[in-house]
Amino acid sequence: MCIRDSQRGYPVVESGMPQIPREELPTSDDEWKARLTPEQFEVARKAGTERAFTGEYWDNHEDGTYTCVCCGAPLFSSKTKFESGSGWPSFWEPIEQAPVGEETDRSYGMVRTEVRCENCDAHLGHVFPDGPNPTGQRYCINSASLKLEEDT
Ligand code: FE
């Protein structure tokens, strides 16, 4: 459910976490570079991939909401995070109504389904049909595209 945050005017979802409105997002690479670390920029804005088992969250077990590192949109809940053995944080489902979009990715001689943040067009990772119950989906997401807002 999307309601308005009356103080900031930002759209917020059920978790109460605001996301940056699209019109306030950077439009150039230089602006994004000023906001992100070099790795976050390379992964989220240039569709890079962090090396397996190196990211901040693949082995993180704190409760909370994983938001988009670029725009703050809530994307995944720790409740749907599972041990995939892949070395990347893995989820079986996005948060309801999260701006998680899918696109066909034909790079590197493979056909994969890329996952992007629809609010800011950040590259997040890929989704594969070999996940656990209840969805059978495995959202394989780069830590560099995420920021965990821990439950308080
Ligand atoms: Fe985003």
Image (spheres, grey):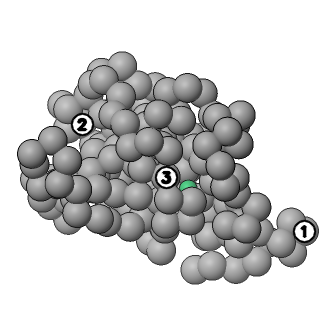
Tell whether 118 sits left or right of 134: right
Query: Which residue is rendered at x = 44% and y = 54% of the image?
Result: 76
Give the amino acid type for the residue marked by disc 3 in the picture. Ala
Which one is in front in this view, the residue at disc 1 or the one at disc 2? 1
Q: Can residue 15 be seen in this view?
A: yes
Relative to 152, residue 129 above or below: below
Cα distance, mark 3 to mark 1? 26 Å
Q: Which mark is residue 83?
A: 2
Q: Does the residue labelled 2 lie within 8 Å of ligand 1?
A: no
Residues packed near mark 1 inside 10 Å, few (<14), some (14 to 19) or many (20 plus): few
Label 3, on which residue?
Answer: 122
Query: Which residue is rendered at x = 61% and y = 43% of the image?
Result: 29
Q: Nearer the viewer, residue 99 or 47?
A: 47
Relative to 48, residue 124 above or below: below
In which quadrant is the C terminus drawn? top right
Tell whether 97 sits left or right of 105: right
Q: Is mark 3 within 8 Å of ligand 1?
A: yes
Query: Which residue is rendered at x = 40% and y = 48% of the image?
Result: 124
Instruction: Mark 3 or mark 1: name the one nearer the start of the chain.
Output: 1
Instruction: Mark 3 or mark 2: name the one nearer the start of the chain.
Output: 2
Cα distance, mark 1 to mark 2? 38 Å
Q: Is mark 1 on a helix, strand or loop?
A: loop
Q: Residue 7 carries which label?
A: 1
